[in-house]
Amino acid sequence: MPAVTTLAGNEERVSKWRYGEVVLRNGRAVSIQARWWPRWGTVWGAMVDRVVRSLPEDECRFYYSFPRSAPGYMSLLYVHAGEKTYYRTFHQGIVAIDAIAGLHKARAIVCQVTNDRLNDRMMTRWGYVKHAENLGDNHYIRRLKP
């Protein structure tokens, strides 16, 4: 699959990808890669990732999708972060996801948070608010400026 090391100069290319993965290491994005299909997160998959596919120190991966069923919206599908991933690395992932959503002219980013380390205060700081309360209390949306 095609991959780039930075968004700068690759905006048009990345804006055509419906599914993708952002790899961050030591507070920097090292790779943005297209995917053939989305990377769905499940409880079982998260347990396997924690035990079998653990990441090196200070690395995390963000998986996103622009679903055909919801044009204008970006879905942050799964984030795989190691135990020793620093806040600055995770935050740079949020920044990269925002930039990719901007390239696609998305109206909002939606996600479901199932990690205890991501609390309401942190999500509010990043601009996310609770959404779809009928589906549970861990769904968030970040509306983007047009």
Image: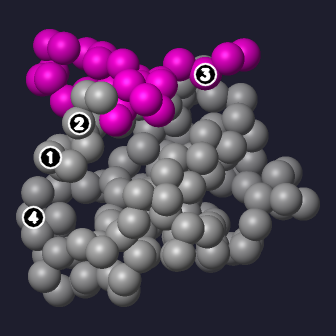
Cα distance, mark 1 to mark 4? 17 Å
Image height of 52 relative to 126, above or below: below
Q: Nearer the viewer, residue 55 or 68?
A: 55
Q: Nearer the viewer, residue 20 or 50?
A: 50
Residue for point 30% across, 29% down: 121
Image height of 88 relative to 70, above or below: below
Image height of 33 relative to 67, above or below: below
Pointer 2: residues within 10 angstroms few (<14), some, or many (20+)?
few
Q: Which residue is mark 2?
A: 119
Q: Which residue is mark 1?
A: 116
Place of residue 14 in the rendered image (x, y in percent of width and height, measured from the top left)? 73, 55
Q: Quadrant of residue 29?
A: bottom right
Kind of element beneath mark 4? helix
Q: Which residue is mark 3?
A: 144
Q: Amino acid at mark 2?
A: Asn
Which quarter of the image is occupied by the N terminus? bottom right
Residue for point 71% across, 29% down: 105
